[in-house]
Amino acid sequence: MEKRHDMGTGGDCICPKCEARMEHKRGIPCQDERCPKCGAKMLREDSYHHELLMVKKAKKNKPE
């Protein structure tokens, strides 16, 4: 059975590498889209995986 995320309509897909944004297309998961700039798989804005990426980047940029 396929897992559905049901994040609703609207929002953006965001590239985890170059941070390019594109409008989310209804019915097409962001992870199935490729970044138009660098070709990486996109992430849905405010998704679980996007939140993990933001935490990782915050830790990396945090001064010690």
Image (tube, rainbow, N blue to C red):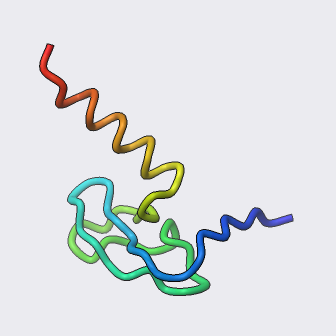
Q: Quadrant of residue 46?
A: bottom left
Disc tally is: 0
In the rendered image, which quarter contains the C terminus? top left
Q: Residue at x 31, y 68 (%)?
A: 39
Residue 6 in the image: x percent, y percent?
66, 70
Q: Residue at x 34, y 43 (%)?
A: 54
Residue 47 in the image: x percent, y percent?
51, 57
In the rendered image, which quarter contains the N terminus? bottom right
Q: Residue at x 40, y 65 (%)?
A: 42
Residue 38 in the image: x percent, y percent?
24, 66
Outermost residue toward the top in this view: 64
Outermost residue toward the right in this view: 1
Q: In the displayed structure, does residue 52 sit left or right of residue 37? A: right
Q: Quadrant of residue 13?
A: bottom left
Q: Residue at x 48, y 86 (%)?
A: 25
Residue 59 in the image: x percent, y percent?
28, 27
Q: In the displayed structure, does residue 1 sit left or right of residue 63? A: right
39 or 59: nearer the eye?
A: 59
31 or 22: nearer the eye?
A: 22
Q: In the displayed structure, does residue 32 sit left or right of residue 19? A: right
Q: Vertically, is 58 above or below 6? A: above
18 or 54: nearer the eye?
A: 54
